Amino acid sequence: MVAVITKSDFSLNLKNHLRILLLAAVAVFHLWIQITGLKYTTAANTGWIIGTAPIFIAILGFIFLKEKLNPLKISGIIIAFIGLLLLVGKGNPLNIDLVKNVGDMLVLFSSFTWGVYSIINKKISLNYSPLMTILYLFIMMALIIIPFNINQKAIDSVIHLSSIGWISILFLGLLCSGVSYVIWAYSLREMESARVGAYLYFEPFVTVITAGLFLKEEITLLMVLSGLLIILGVYLVNKE
């Protein structure tokens, strides 16, 4: 609707249609593994692990966009990785088990896919309006998702959704997806992908506080210290 009101240019060549289709596939996969991971881990753990996304963005930016990756950034990657091991292993990396910690592993992989998404998005946003890009992106995401949800169970879930459920969907759809994806695309067009990724510093803190307040999740000292180690590493990765 916003794209139509602002009279955005809707022209797009075949090559970039395919790029946005790839972007949509990555976005759908990213959301699916993150939501699946949340079933097997806490929201607080998820918040800290998602905080590693800027590291993946920096590494992929170095590989595909020729962005700088100096010794300080490399040391930051190592520090963040140590923090991640302590968080997932609850203080002992030897405790990490791919089955027992499947939720954490899926969330970590979703951080990597967000890095992939950001790199592809940057390439597209350099040539096209972010608003138009997101419009095409959401259309293609819907086309990918719909075939997997045309069944009686999904229809019944929608019909019997509570008012809180609808409010949650509107919040996730309009703000967490709509507005934030557009802002992210505009930011990627104007700045280096690593610098944009640095703003994800705030997400773990918001998630942990929210999880404690609304989900009554236990926030331990080890969790906070491990998370801060991750954030320190991410800070060094994005330090000029």
Image (cartoon, rainbow, N blue to C red):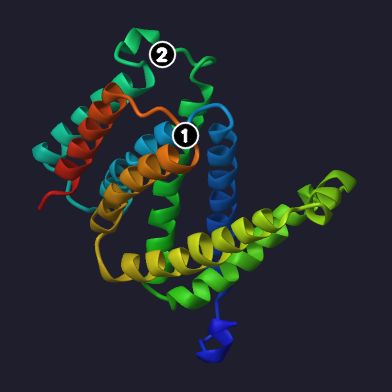
Residue 17 found in image quarter: bottom right
Q: Quadrant of the N terminus?
A: bottom right
| Position of 75 relative to 114 (above/below) | above
Q: Residue at x 40, y 75 (%)?
A: 127
Decide which of 44, 34 is in the foreground and name it: 44
Q: Is the residue marked by circle 2 packed among few (<14), some (14-19), or many (20+) residues within 10 Å?
A: some
Residue 151 visible somewhere in the drawing: yes
Residue 60, x across and y down, in percent: 33, 46
Left-right relation of 103 to 205: right
Which badge, 1 or 2, is on the more N-terminal residue?
2
Q: CA distance from mark 1 to mark 2?
A: 25 Å
Determine the residue positioned at 51% across, 77% down.
132
Image coordinates of residue 129 in percent, x first then y, are 44, 78
Observer-nearest of 221 and 103: 221
Amino acid at the residue labelled 2? Ile
| Above or below for 55 versus 188 | above
Q: Nearer the viewer, mark 1 or mark 2?
A: 1
- State the residue position of label 2: 96
Query: Residue at the spot x=22%, y=41% of the render?
Result: 234
Task: Look at the numbered discs 1 and 2 and tell me whether their residues touch, using CB distance below 8 Å.
Answer: no
Count the marks.
2
**Residue holding disc 1:** 216
Q: In this view of the protein, which residue sits in the foreground, 105 or 231?
A: 231
Q: Secondary structure at mark 2?
A: loop
Three-letter amino acid code at disc 1?
A: Lys
Q: Which mark is residue 206?
A: none
Residue 10 visible in the current orientation: no
Q: Residue furthest right?
A: 152
Within 10 Å of disc 1 (Cα), the crowding (few <14, some 14-19, many 20+) is few
Q: Residue at x 36, y 16 (%)?
A: 89
